[in-house]
Image: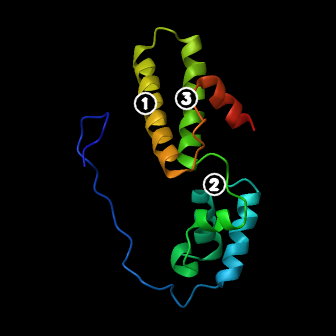
């Protein structure tokens, strides 16, 4: 699939090996993994970072194969899921930094365009998450609202 803003074709990447069950050498069982995910999420780690920690430090190659649930499903069950989805929060953080930069460098037109592209991505994600029920219908993107959401 082609890139949306870059006028390039998609990148090829490596694929995970096809497996239907967790390997026998995984040192933790289901409940230990779920408790570890809940503890790491309560410490403020994102779901991607939780997966990296469990893979690199605890030897769990795939949480979904080991438990039958994704990291976000486990976080949702344990009531430690963040209010904003991870990808939306990362984009909001990027927009806030770019806006602070553009206040000092008002004539940087390339980054001003990048700000517009980021805001378009945020609005598309907002629309998607509203249809999926992740965000409330009253949630609306604005720069001041983004700074307020991330400061919490």
Give percent across and percent down for residue 43. 76, 57
Label ID, residue 46: 2
Kindly check if marks 3 and 2 are in contact, taking CB atoms under 8 A apart as contact. no
Where residue 150 appears, x then y in whole percent? 68, 36
Which sits earlier in the primary sequence, circle 3 or circle 2? 2
Res 90 quadrant in image: top right
Along the viewing direction, whichever of 98 and 42 lies nearer the viewer: 42
Residue under the image location 37 percent in, 76 percent down: 17
Q: Which mark is residue 120?
A: 1
What is the secondary structure assignment of the residue under circle 1?
Answer: helix
Please state the horizontal and vertical placement of residue 58, each as a whole percent of the image: 65, 75
* Of the image marks 2 and 1, the number of the one nearer the N terminus: 2
Other residues around mark 3 within 10 Å, as few (<14) / some (14–19) / many (≥20): many
Residue 95's mark? Answer: 3
Q: Is residue 101 above or below residue 94?
A: above
Q: Quadrant of residue 152?
A: top right
Position of 148 with respect to 17 (left or right) is: right
Whether residue 149 is visible to the viewer of this picture, yes or no, is yes
Q: In this image, 50 relative to 20: left or right? A: right
Query: What residue do we see at 55% from left, 29% from top?
Result: 95
Which residue ends up furthest to the front in the rendered image? 137
Please tell me in which quadrant of the rendered image residue 75 appears: bottom right
Q: Mark 1 or mark 3, which has the lower sequence index?
A: 3
Alpha carbons under labels 1 and 3: distance apart: 11 Å
Q: Residue at x 58, y 76 (%)?
A: 60
SS at circle 3 = helix
């Amino acid at each position: 699939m082609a890139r949306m803003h870059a006028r390039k074709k998609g990148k090829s990447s490596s694929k995970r090996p096809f497996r239907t069950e967790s390997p026998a050498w995984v040192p933790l069982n289901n409940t230990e993994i779920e408790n570890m995910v809940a503890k790491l999420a309560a410490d403020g780690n994102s779901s991607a970072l939780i997966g990296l920690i469990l893979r690199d430090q605890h030897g769990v190659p795939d949480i979904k194969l080991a438990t039958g649930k994704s990291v976000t499903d486990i976080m949702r069950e344990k009531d430690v899921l963040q209010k904003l989805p991870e990808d939306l929060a990362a984009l909001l953080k990027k927009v806030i930094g770019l806006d602070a930069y553009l206040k000092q460098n008002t004539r940087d037109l390339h980054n001003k365009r990048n700000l517009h592209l980021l805001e378009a991505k945020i609005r598309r994600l907002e629309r998607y998450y509203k249809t999926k029920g992740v965000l409330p219908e009253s949630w609306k993107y604005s720069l001041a609202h983004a700074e307020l959401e991330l400061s919490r």
